[in-house]
Image (spheres, rainbow, N blue to C red):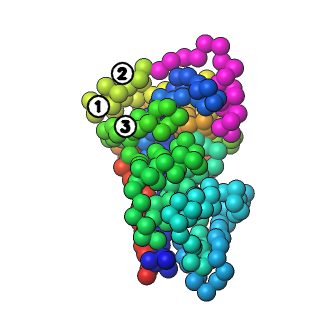
């Protein structure tokens, strides 16, 4: 039985400060060394329950192309949670989604939404499931979902399920998305075609991050998918960020969003003011330890 009739949550996106592929398992999954960072950009999910309607779930979103059926990770997360917790929805559960995170951008929008749905349902139905168990559930939905449940700054290894918390950098980001999209399966396929992939300096990056020096940390940003995908639009976006004062710039995830690192929000805002005329998606954000934020509930 639901404890609430309405509940609204934020689902925070992420960037990859470092992303390297270090091997492949027998089942075909690639093994990673990646440092992920949640950022202060988010989607919102609003859950409401009509106890007088037939049992089921409905997704509502005005974003063009957003799937509203059981192919959506939010829907899959709800069904997975319901089965795991041995509950019923208790009527028609409507989830209204406000999409602010771009799709096929490498910002984990779908994973963040799925993670937020798992945590929201845990609150909505008062099931008190431990976060580590939610992470195990999330791993069935996607490799980034466990991180999106935990949030913050974390070194993620294996296929993303082995996580260690790290200190968060003190900086600001400007994130822009070129007018091109990349599918994750295609990114991995292109990586497999690389004959001699570059390797990152993980130890140096971790030492720089631990020092709290954003200038040093920026030197060791790395994403192997930049080499695999090699899109001119991404290269141009990285260059424009540096021209506007970024200490460094990097594509996040499998792309195609690119972020620039700035000392503070003022410098980032100045850069964004120049770049927002060139890119439809251009946002200033900061690192955050949050993965999920409860906005309000109505009993």
Q: Looking at the image, which residue sits at the far left? A: 211
**Residue matched to label 2:** 204
The residue sitting at the bottom extreme is: 52
Residue under circle 3? 164
Please tell me which residue is depicted at 53% across the width and 46% down the height of the picture.
139
Q: Is residue 34 magenta?
A: no
Nearer-the-camera pick, 134 or 224:
134
Q: Quadrant of residue 186?
A: top right
Please give the name of the residue rendered at 38% of the width and 46% of the height, measured from the top-left corner.
152
The spot of residue 99 in percent (x, y) is: 59, 59
Disc 1: which residue: 210
Question: What is the CA distance from the residue labelled 3 to the residue labelled 1?
Answer: 13 Å
- Tell me, yes or no, whether the two marked residues, 1 and 2, touch with CB atoms within 8 Å: no
Q: Nearer the viewer, residue 33 or 25?
A: 25
Q: Secondary structure at mark 1?
A: helix
Instruction: Tell me the residue at 38%/25% (across/down).
Output: 205
Name the disc covering residue 240, or none: none
* Secondary structure of the residue carrying numbered label 2: helix
Q: Nearer the viewer, residue 164 or 18?
A: 164
In the current view of this chain or complex, which residue is farthest to the top?
196
For the residues marked 2 and 3, what is the alpha-carbon distance in whole angstroms? 17 Å
- Magenta residues span 182-200
- Rendered-image quadrant of the C terminus: bottom left
Q: Considering only order in the chain, which callout, 2 or 1, is on the residue closer to the N terminus?
A: 2
């Amino acid at each position: 039985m639901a404890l609430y009739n309405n509940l609204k949550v934020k689902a925070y996106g992420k960037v990859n400060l470092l992303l390297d592929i270090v091997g492949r398992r027998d089942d075909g999954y690639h093994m990673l060394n990646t440092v992920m960072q949640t950022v202060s950009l988010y989607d919102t999910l609003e859950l409401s329950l009509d106890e007088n309607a037939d049992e089921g779930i409905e997704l509502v979103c005005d974003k063009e192309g957003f799937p509203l059926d059981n192919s959506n990770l939010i829907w899959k997360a709800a069904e997975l949670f319901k089965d795991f917790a041995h509950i019923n929805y208790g009527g028609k559960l409507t989830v209204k989604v406000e999409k602010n995170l771009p799709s096929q951008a490498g910002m984990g929008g779908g994973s963040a939404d799925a993670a937020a749905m798992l945590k929201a349902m845990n609150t909505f139905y008062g099931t008190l499931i431990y976060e580590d168990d939610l992470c195990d559930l999330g791993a069935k939905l996607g490799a980034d979902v466990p991180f999106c449940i935990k949030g913050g700054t974390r070194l993620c290894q294996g296929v993303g399920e082995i996580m260690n918390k790290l200190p968060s950098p003190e900086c600001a980001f400007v994130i822009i998305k070129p007018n091109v999209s990349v599918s994750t399966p295609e990114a991995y396929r292109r990586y497999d075609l690389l004959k001699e992939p570059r390797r990152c300096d993980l130890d140096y990056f971790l030492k720089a991050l631990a020092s709290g020096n954003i200038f040093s940390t920026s030197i060791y940003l790395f994403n192997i998918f930049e080499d695999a995908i090699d899109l001119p639009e991404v290269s141009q976006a990285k260059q424009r960020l540096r021209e506007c004062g970024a200490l460094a710039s990097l594509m996040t995830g499998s792309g195609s969003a690119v972020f620039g690192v700035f000392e503070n929000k003022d410098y980032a805002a100045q850069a964004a003011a120049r770049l927002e005329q060139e890119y439809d998606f251009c946002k200033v954000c900061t690192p955050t330890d949050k993965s999920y934020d409860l906005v309000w509930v109505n009993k």
